[in-house]
């Protein structure tokens, strides 16, 4: 139950970040600055809590249940994707967001025409889309459990 709640928090935060990105144009400084402040809040208090919580619950499941980390291929793939997604979040999404906040604070309205700011903004948007795609794939793995060993049923033979 906690794993699902935390994963929903994580995914909801990523989707909120994406919606905020598509919900505004880089037209006015005040709007852009306020949206970026909102992105920081979503990242710090929604996405990060969901990600860390999901990670901790996953580690607990890996050590304390029969699911393990490598027993099932679909779980191993989920772990690999989660790690990739987390690295994208830390080293691309958050880094670009904070770099753009610094540019906005330093240059104010001039930042909206700064090619580095615009490039960071567009790259961050693409990275968030990639995070959404990875998360949806992880959810599909959790529901479908592909590569799971199927139980075989042997028919009873009757002797006549």
Image: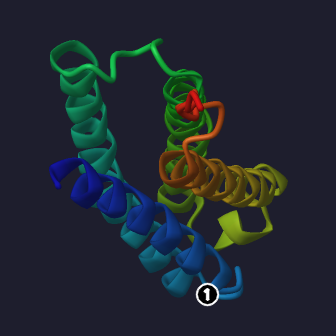
Residue nearest the observer in this picture, 148 or 74: 148
Along the line of sight, which residue is nearer the eye, 152 or 147?
A: 152
Q: How many numbered marks, from 0 up? A: 1
According to the picture, the residue beneath numbered tag 1 turns out to be 23
Residue 4 at what x, y percent from top left?
28, 56
> In the rendered view, does 68 fall on the left or right side of 118?
left
In this view, the residue farthest toward the front is: 160
Left or right side of 122 for 160: left
Task: Kindly indicate the quadrant of the structure image that contains residue 91.
Answer: top right
Find residue 140 and report its horizontal and vertical position in percent: 59, 54
Residue 88: where, in percent of width, then height?
A: 60, 35
> In this orientation, does residue 21 appear?
yes
Crowding at dot 1, Cα within 10 Å, few <14 / some 14-19 / many 20+, comes out as few
Residue 8 or residue 129, whichever sits in front? 8
Q: Residue 74, relative to residue 65: is it above or below?
A: below
**Could you tell me which quadrant the C terminus lies in?**
top right
Q: Say which residue appears at 55% left-offset and 32% top-offset.
A: 158
Please tell me which residue is depicted at 20% across the width and 22% down the height of the picture: 65
Q: Is mark 1 on a helix, strand or loop?
A: loop
Q: Is residue 27 above or below residue 101?
A: below
Q: Is residue 152 visible?
A: no
Is 146 rendered above or below residue 115? above
Which part of the image, by quadrant, shows the N terminus?
bottom left
Q: Which of 5 and 12 is in front in this view?
A: 5
């Amino acid at each position: 139950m906690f794993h699902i709640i935390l994963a929903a928090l994580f995914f909801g935060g990523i989707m909120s970040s994406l919606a905020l990105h598509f919900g505004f144009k880089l037209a006015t400084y005040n709007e852009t600055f306020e949206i970026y402040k909102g992105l920081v809040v979503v990242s710090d208090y929604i996405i990060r809590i969901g990600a860390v919580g999901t990670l901790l619950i996953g580690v607990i499941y890996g050590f304390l249940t029969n699911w393990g980390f490598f027993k099932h291929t679909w779980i191993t793939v989920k772990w690999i994707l989660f790690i990739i997604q987390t690295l994208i979040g830390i080293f691309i999404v958050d880094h670009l967001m904070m770099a753009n906040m610094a540019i906005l604070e330093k240059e104010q309205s001039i930042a909206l025409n700064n090619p580095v700011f615009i490039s960071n903004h567009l790259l961050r948007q693409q990275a968030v889309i990639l995070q959404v795609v990875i998360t949806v794939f992880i959810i599909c793995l959790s529901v479908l459990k592909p590569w799971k060993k199927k139980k075989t049923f042997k028919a009873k033979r009757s002797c006549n």
